[in-house]
Amino acid sequence: MSNIADIAKALVSPGKGILAADESAPTIEKRFKSIQVSSTEESRRNYRELLFRAAGLGQFISGVILFDETIRQRATDGTPLTELLQRQGIIPGIKVDAGTSPLALFPGDKITEGLDKLRNRFAEYSGLGAQFSKWRAVITIGDGIPSPYCLEANAHALARFAALSQEMGLVPIVEPEVLMDGPHTIERCEEVTATALAAVFQALTAHRVRFESMLLKPNMVVSGKECPRQAGPGEVAEATLRCLKRFVPAAVPGMVFLSGGMSDVDATKNLNAMNQLGGAPWELSFSFGRALQAPALRAWAGKAGNAAAAQQALLHRARCNQAARFGRYDHTIEQNG
Ligand code: 13P
């Protein structure tokens, strides 16, 4: 596949979605701590190797987002981890942002870093087999935040990233994540998501990004984690699609939702509800990190002897999300797989 528009389409092929396994060193350390495993180059490799070796993963997963360390790593038998993915028909991708920092003079707002020398890094990642890339902007809802400047600065960085990625032949996944943290209502989440998306697409247009050759990784429009009224899947689906339809051009091939700290089952239920509603001009897919990995991580618990159980747990969540891609997820699939 040489045309990046074809790669973008392949990443959202019907029934398939993306596994986000691109946790940075501090994030994977936090995840491992929850299962009392220390994070070393070897433990990170062992864990990711077992995920990528799960037999049949390619039926459900179109692409995997990798972290800088992982794209360079080899499996225990010397095979590059990217090759394990390619053997399963899975497209390797790479997270290229360098994480967030406080936005100077805007207390509470964050800006994503990593644009310096990014063209050179893209060339290297392309040589290592990456065919798509991801950049995550983080937008926090709070008292007086996000500021309009935070949205503008993050949209600008996302657009610079996306343009460079396309120039270098990798499909950009543009991720403006409005966080779920806080007591805000679903209405406030919709309002902030709308403003963020409007800024992002204005910047992408100004930077000549081709919509056919990118994917959007949006948050779902949900109630804040500490909001007393938690919206159910039907309401989340309606609010999310209403918001996206207002701001996202139909030329973008797909929405690959993040899970953002929702439970794995909630993420699947919400995705299912969106696909049941139908009528969207894009594929409604997933690019889940925690919502695909959480049960596998628990089953593994750092022990090689648990690898098969961890792989089954990953395949189960992948199968459930495949069903949700078709709006066919239900209790029976959750119970029996
Ligand atoms: P979560 O699904 O755990 O939010 O991770 C997705 C991701 O890649 C965030 O950048």
Image (tube, helix red, strand yellow):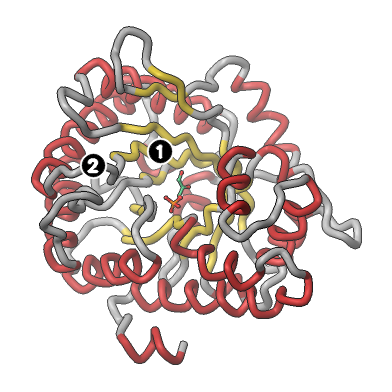
Residue at 78% across, 70% down: 304
Q: Is mark 2 within 8 Å of ligand 1?
A: no
| Label 2 element class | loop
Q: Is mark 1 within 8 Å of ligand 1?
A: no
**Residue type for callout 2:** Gly
When asked about the image quadrant of residue 154, the answer is top left
Residue to which mark 2 is pinned: 182
Spot occupied by residue 68 in the image (x, y as percentages of width and height): 68, 38
Distance of label 1 from label 2 (alpha carbons): 24 Å
* Left or right: 93 in relation to 178: right
| Label 1 element class | strand
Q: Which mark is residue 174?
A: 1
Single out the residue that lies furthest toward the top: 105
Answer few, some or many: residues within 10 Å of disc 1's Cα (few below 14, many 20 plus, some between 14 and 19). Answer: many
Residue at 48% across, 38% down: 172
Res 86 visible: no
> In the figure, 319 relative to 120: above or below?
below
* Left or right: 79 in relation to 14: right
**Residue type for callout 1:** Val
Q: Earlier in the sequence, mark 1 or mark 2?
A: 1
> In the figure, 129 relative to 62: above or below?
above
Spot occupied by residue 238 in the image (x, y as percentages of width and height): 12, 60
Answer few, some or many: residues within 10 Å of disc 2's Cα (few below 14, many 20 plus, some between 14 and 19). Answer: some
* Left or right: 126 in relation to 191: right
